[in-house]
Image (cartoon, rainbow, N blue to C red):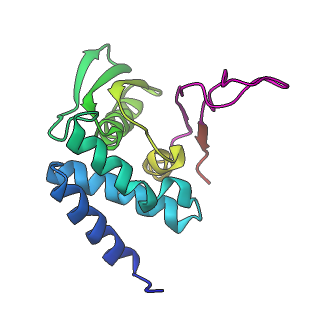
Amino acid sequence: MARLSPDALTALAIDTLRRAGALEATAESTARALVYADLRGLSSHGVARLPMYCAQLRNGRVDPVAQPAIVADRGAAVLVDGADGLAYPACDLAVSTLIDRARQFGSAVAGVKRSHHFGVGAAHLAALGAAGRVALAFSNSPAAMPAWGGRRALFGTNPIAAVFPR
């Protein structure tokens, strides 16, 4: 089995996403997050997701040219609209805004709407930790598992991530 360096894997993922129609910035942001997951042994959220993401870019489930934007701004609180695109650029915008706003206001909160699967939550929080911030990330999820003894999916996984700088 061939092994790729992280840089080569990132380049391959960027090329794959670009060929599926994603904007360069979207492809780069997504590839970084997928490789981040693989490097941490979380392959379920790594480049193995590329075929699904590319299919969704091509079939219209995800807008390949979406441009995330801040659509509500209340100083220490912002809302980012992912414009029905891949979540990673919207999360990048939220995180960079949070870093600036937390410096300005002492704490900050951001929400992201109309986005796609956001992957490994810790990938988004790394920059906040590096900036010396405590951060939490939460996401909703569709019904994925039944209640104890149940037969149909009822509960989502509701991912949560946290970072505490040291």
Name the residue nearer the viewer: 117 or 124. Answer: 117
Q: Based on the displayed image, in which of its 4 quarters is residue 84 positioned?
A: top left
Query: Is 153 included in the stretch rendered in magenta?
Result: yes
Which quadrant holds the C terminus? bottom right
How far from the left and from the top, in percent, is residue 103? Answer: 39, 34
How far from the left and from the top, in percent, is residue 35? Answer: 42, 63
Name the residue nearer the viewer: 17 or 71. Answer: 17
Q: Which residue shows up at 66% across the image and 23% down it?
A: 155
How far from the left and from the top, in percent, is residue 153? Answer: 66, 25
Q: Which residue shows up at 46% across the image and 28% down it?
A: 106
Q: Which residue shows up at 21% across the image and 35% down it?
A: 63
Name the residue nearer the viewer: 129 or 20. Answer: 20
Left or right relative to 129: residue 57 = left
Q: Which residue shows up at 15% across the image and 48% down it?
A: 23
Position of 73 relative to 91 (above/below):
above
Position of 90 relative to 32 (above/below):
above
Q: Residue furthest bottom?
A: 2
Which portion, as a residue range, is magenta?
A: 133-159
Position of 71 relative to 126 (above/below):
above
